[in-house]
Image (cartoon, rainbow, N blue to C red):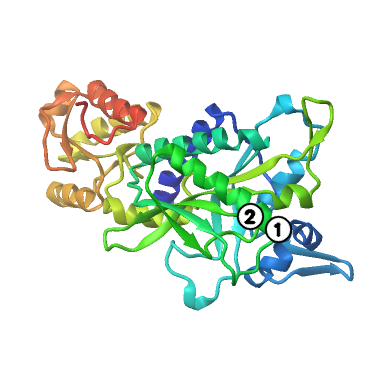
């Protein structure tokens, strides 16, 4: 719906720019692929129970909805020769992926069959893994601060003796040791969770809790030696030989669906101004001020704001309706304000500002949006 689409667009735009500045290259990859691709990656043998059934195009050609983007990004890395001077290669995408979840485990936005994941795969040399993970952890902290997510803690998700995992015990020991070292170096507290690893490698999970103490995984950093071998990925190393990169799967905020399930609960619908679906509702006191309200709306839209004019019902009812929607600003324009080209702003926390010039009010809101401040007025 339009309100959710507006908020999601803002967060996706923020993430793309944050990652672009951190050296990520954005791509679009197809949401369907040949079954053979997922057989090659190992997903078919380890993960097919959670995939939708293949669509047969012919006797030897079957297509499936992708459960993950990593095989596609591995092919992008392999699409041209790579050198150690190119590393790390960071390939990012906000894209759809699909899981054949049973009806009994589906739940609101938190557990869905089709998700849009903020995903990326970083290809680096073995001796660059520590720096790369540290950089990802820093990006997660920055994104959480901007969006307004309070992290509950970190979890080192390892394999156990009962699960079905790809690769050798030596590979797993090395990968788990590297993630443990990265967490120790970052100075964060964490718990270890045997049996919570991906089939191809261990991971760092960032856990969050909602207001009723339900815990879920928001962000992940996964270390993978398995798929680079399956796709025979390599780069020209400094000695003139060929070396295999390490593949780091990472998501700063997880899927858009689970993210918003958490944000709605965590903020009670009162999102930070910059990604609020509507920044301001303008309330003309009477029809005589409709023109002034429309002028405010036009100027605000030009300034990049999302603004509505409310005209149906009494003034009190319109103000209450905006408050119920947790709109950050309500701009009231009466006869005096219209005559002076002013507006009286009411903030969703109950404060009221003195009438100010329309241009000043628009600038105030635009500055709060641009700064991604958690406040409603400059501090």
Q: Residue at x 71, y 72 (%)?
A: 53
Cα separation, mark 2 vs mark 1, equals: 6 Å
Farthest-out residue, right: 59
**Are the residues flagged by discs 2 and 1 in contact, CB closer than 8 Å?**
yes
Q: Which is more toward the observer, 138 or 166?
A: 166
Measured as percent of width and height from the top left, residue 12 is found at 49, 41
In the image, is residue 25 above or below residue 112?
A: above
In the image, is residue 26 above or below residue 69?
A: above
Per the rendering, the mark at residue 172 is 2
Q: Residue at x 53, y 33 (%)?
A: 19
**Which residue position holds label 1?**
168
Measured as percent of width and height from the top left, residue 144 is found at 38, 41
Q: Residue at x 37, y 61 (%)?
A: 215
- Element type at mark 2: helix
| Residue 242, visible in the rendered structure | yes
Q: In which quarter of the view is residue 185 placed?
A: top left
In the image, is residue 185 above or below residue 54?
A: above
Q: Which is more toward the observer, 163 or 301?
A: 163
Q: In which quarter of the view is residue 233 placed?
A: top right
């Amino acid at each position: 719906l339009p309100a959710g689409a507006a908020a999601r667009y803002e967060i996706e735009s923020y993430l793309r720019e944050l990652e672009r500045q951190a050296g990520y290259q954005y791509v679009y990859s197809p949401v369907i692929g040949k079954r053979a691709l997922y057989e090659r990656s190992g997903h078919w043998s380890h993960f097919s129970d959670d995939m939708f059934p293949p669509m047969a195009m012919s006797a030897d050609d079957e297509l499936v909805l992708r459960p993950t983007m990593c095989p596609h990004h591995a092919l992008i890395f392999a699409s041209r020769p790579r050198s150690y001077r190119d590393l790390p290669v960071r390939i990012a995408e906000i894209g759809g992926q699909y899981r054949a979840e049973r009806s009994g485990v589906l739940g609101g936005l938190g557990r869905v069959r089709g998700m849009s994941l903020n995903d990326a795969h970083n290809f680096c040399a073995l001796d660059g893994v520590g720096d790369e993970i540290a950089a990802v952890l820093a990006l997660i902290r920055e994104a959480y601060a901007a969006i307004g997510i309070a992290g509950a803690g970190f979890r080192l998700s390892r394999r156990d003796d009962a699960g079905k995992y790809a690769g050798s015990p030596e590979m797993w020991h090395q990968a788990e040791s590297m993630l443990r070292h990265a967490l120790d170096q970052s100075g964060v507290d964490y718990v270890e969770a045997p049996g919570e690893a991906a089939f191809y490698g261990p991971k760092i999970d960032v856990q969050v809790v909602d207001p009723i103490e339900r815990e879920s995984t928001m962000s992940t950093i996964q270390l993978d030696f398995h798929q680079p071998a399956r796709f025979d990925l390599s780069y020209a190393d400094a000695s003139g030989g060929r070396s295999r990169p390490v593949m780091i799967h990472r998501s700063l905020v997880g899927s858009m669906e689970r993210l918003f399930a958490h944000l709605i609960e965590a903020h009670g619908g009162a999102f930070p101004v910059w990604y609020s679906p509507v920044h301001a509702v303008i309330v003309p006191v009477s029809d005589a001020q409709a023109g002034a309200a429309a002028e405010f709306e036009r100027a605000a839209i030009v300034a990049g704001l999302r603004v509505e004019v409310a005209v149906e019902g009494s003034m009190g009812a319109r103000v209450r309706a905006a408050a119920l929607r947790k709109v950050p600003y309500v701009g009231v324009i009466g006869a005096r304000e219209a005559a002076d080209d002013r507006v009286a702003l009411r903030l969703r926390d109950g404060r009221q500002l003195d009438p100010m010039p329309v241009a000043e009010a628009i600038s105030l809101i635009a500055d709060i949006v641009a700064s991604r401040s958690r406040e409603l007025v400059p501090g």
